[in-house]
Amino acid sequence: MAYLDRQTATQGDGLSESTRGERAWSDFMALPRVKRLALSEHEAVFFEGDRADRLFEITDGAVMLYKLLPDGRRQVVEVLGSGDLLGLQASHLYDCSAETLIPSRLRAIDRNDLDTYPELQTHVNRCLLGQLQTMHEHAVLLGRKSAFERVTSFLMRFVPKRGAIGCEGPVKGSPDEKVIVLAMTRQEIADYLGLTIETVSRVFSDLRRRGLITAEKHDRVRILDICGLCKLTGTH
Amino acid sequence: MAYLDRQTATQGDGLSESTRGERAWSDFMALPRVKRLALSEHEAVFFEGDRADRLFEITDGAVMLYKLLPDGRRQVVEVLGSGDLLGLQASHLYDCSAETLIPSRLRAIDRNDLDTYPELQTHVNRCLLGQLQTMHEHAVLLGRKSAFERVTSFLMRFVPKRGAIGCEGPVKGSPDEKVIVLAMTRQEIADYLGLTIETVSRVFSDLRRRGLITAEKHDRVRILDICGLCKLTGTH
DNA sequence: CGCGATTTTGATAATGTTCAACAGTAGTGG
DNA sequence: CCACTACTGTTGAACATTATCAAAATCGCG
């Protein structure tokens, strides 16, 4: 289960840095000491316990945060995408490890710059609130949902504007379909959903047999009946 | 399982308000429009889906945040204590319901006051970061720990300075004991740990049989061997 | 003391895990 | 271009853990 080994994982950090300012929606990008990192897939950004003297904004790509138990069990605690922040800590150490899921571009911000640029706080705050709310939903998934509900909830995350409170079903006449790219291996999905790889695989197979999805590739799934899938999430 | 019913729960809000300023460690308390609430145990503060136009700081007491699934399953997502904030949202609706565990005093702050007092942001930020980190740990508990590990981890939360990274065991010679007050019913503990009430009860009984704890009351537990308990949490 | 609520205990069932074998997929080199 | 290999994913069978259902015990409180 501890398939990720600190020894074998690529040490993150220090690719293609630049310090030039750039106009943007916030002062964020105009900050001094903003390094840019370009990481390929499955590269470490930082490790739990490292000194948290930098935080990161995902310009493009996807990063997972995970924690390991001493015996190797892993829990992926968050999956972050473009615009999200990671590495901001109350203490001076990272509480999670971070690793890219797909090739990603990050901006690294010196932690001290945060305090000197209070106008960033608002942006940081919005990100944290969003992350906290996502964690609340994920706690429900982990604590109270069945394997089926977990996997279907996971799949529904990739369908914007569906499954939310005001969802009124598909547009009439058009097929209720969508192709989604998971960008995660079965092991990563399992570790995110608090399941084993076998259980995840079985649920996928079952959804296929029921005609709710078809597999275009292992990490590319065509949902054939979004509404049908949504009804299995336990949330509605 | 849905033992908490919106109908029967006391509507929170509006007890003993006052607007007088008070000197304190931050400008928080000097804010205008700060209402004070005094709630008894098991009183609702707000409900998921309500308009989130106020946030709260716990002066004294304990509050739980929880979410319900349509079929009545409940997950307690956070347990908050003195100094913690609740009700701050990215959107304009509360994403969780909040209820006191014990008699509590809260300060209600108008949401708009947050933006006008940017110096609060730093304090808010610290709270959010702490809550996010706690949620990460809780995700590991819910996703990867056994019933035994969950309950023992829960008990260890009440023992400050033990079980952390730099814990060096008990002071030599003195007994490795502590009396803790859970302030939660079995049902609340179960809903917090993602278990059933029966499983929680069985683990408690087992810990008693093994001589690791004794029950002083249902929600008062004497831990007889803190180190021994800590080794069962899965974290060390 | 007695009633209602909460907790504990027991027996059984269901869900998900574990272990093992197999299949598909991608990448490598002849 | 195709075999070979390594890796990832799938499937099956037995097992373990936790949930469910039911009943007994204990607690809190008037």
Image (cartoon, coloured by chain):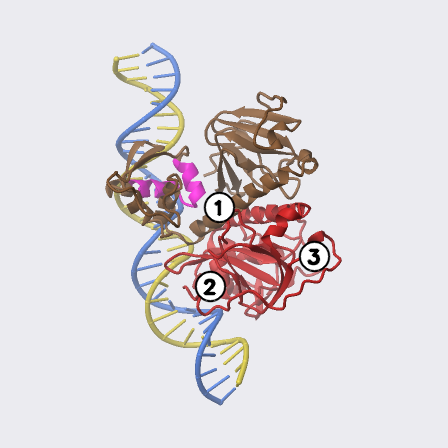
Chain colours: A brown, B red, C blue, D yellow
Measure how far apart labels 3 and 2 are at the Cα level.
45 Å
Looking at the picture, which amino acid does disc 3 mark?
Met
Contact, CB < 8 Å: mark 3 with mark 2? no
Judge left or right: residue B69 versus residue B159: left
Residue at horizontal 25%, vertical 38%?
A: A175
Residue at horizontal 60%, vertical 29%?
A: A29
Residue stretch rendered in magenta on the structure: A186-205
Residue at horizontal 59%, vertical 24%?
A: A22
Looking at the picture, which amino acid does disc 1 mark?
Thr
Image quarter in which the N terminus of chain B is found: bottom left
Q: Is residue A199 magenta?
A: yes
**Picture coordinates of residue B45 (x, y %)?**
54, 62
| Location of residue A144 with respect to B12 vertically, above or below | above
Q: Which mark is residue A182?
A: none
Quickly name the residue at label 2.
B202
Chain hosting mark 3? B
Q: Viewer-nearest of labels 3 and 1?
A: 3
Quickly name the residue at label 1.
A134
**Picture coordinates of residue B72 (x, y %)?**
39, 60
Measure how far apart labels 3 and 1 are at the Cα level.
30 Å
Judge left or right: residue A20 versus residue A140: right
**Picture coordinates of residue A24 (x, y %)?**
57, 29
Chain hosting mark 2? B
Q: Is residue B227 magenta?
A: no
Give the class, few, some or many, for how many residues have Cα within 10 Å of label 3's Cα (few <14, many ≥20).
Answer: some
Helix, strand or loop at label 2? It is helix
Closer-to-camera residue (B34/A101)? B34
| Location of residue A169 with respect to B21 vertically, above or below | above
